[in-house]
Amino acid sequence: MQRLIFSLVVFCMPLAAVGLEWKDLGGGRLQLLDNGKPALVYNYGPQLPEGVPADRKRASYIYPVYTPAGVSVTDDFPKDHYHHRGLFWGWTVVETGGKKYDLWMMKGGIEDKFERWIQKKATGKEALLALENGWYADGVKIVKETVRIAAKPASANTRVIDVTLEFEALNAPVTIKGSQEKGKSYGGFSARFAPRTETHLTADTGPVTKDEDLVNHAWASLEAVYAGKKVSLRIDSDPKNPAGPPQWCLRNYGFAGAAYPGQATATLEKGKPIRLHYTVTLTDK
């Protein structure tokens, strides 16, 4: 009888979540779970916490993102740079039809809006998300943005996330540029880091001991201690990305950005999408 009761109890116990799963949290937030534990959240709808200026509202970015041990390493709406937002992408100069917009600061009448899901798939071995956004300037859609996020279950102490971005002008050409400030190069795929201690920036050339701009790197990483746990986040720029290794913007206050096209100009044209691919690796030390 005892053996029968034990068997019934075991049979009735809920099974633990296995593999990867997408879960809509509401409020324009889609979460990826890895064996029941949060891995990342893609914010497809507009986000604006209470107390933050209304013009800081934004969508289309990844926040938070977690290491396999559950450490959240990115920040959103930091008071020193309200426009910084987890893993994100944007440009300070977007020009079309003789008008200039700022998708980095979300100023000048431009916004990035979610349009539709293309693919939402999760199995025990892989999670894939693909979606279409639109850049709207003064209410008119000027660019089709396609976002693809791919992840596999965490392996030991490492989680790898691939992000692929495609941009195509819909009618008239659209030009994009990074920061035009002298000596700076931000604009493109970027990460803003959460509060931490013992920050160490590193790139393919070795340790980055002071803030850096306009230096080409194939990859860059930030290692630090978050609430007593040492972790790193590394961004690799795909060698096939246009314009070769990007010029990075690296900041010890907690920012790393692979600037494309830097202070140069890239032109988005109809029928000729520009594709950018980055690999994000999070490691518990």
Image (cartoon, helix red, strand yellow):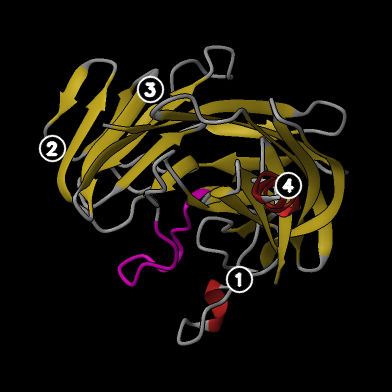
* Residue displayed at 59% across by 56% down: 103
* Residue displayed at 43% across by 59% down: 84
Disc 3 is placed on an element classified as strand
Magenta-span inclusion, residue 86 = yes
The magenta stretch spans which residues? 75-87
- Residue 4 is marked as 4
* Amino acid type, mark 1: Gln
- Residue 47 is marked as 1
- Residue 219 is marked as 3
Magenta-span inclusion, residue 2 = no
Q: Looking at the image, is 242 positioned above or below residue 42?
A: above
Mark 1 packing: few (<14 Cα in 10 Å), some, or many (20+)? some
Q: CA distance from mark 2 to mark 3?
A: 16 Å
State which mark lies toward you, 1 or 4.
Answer: 4
Q: How many marks?
A: 4
Q: Quadrant of the C terminus?
A: top left
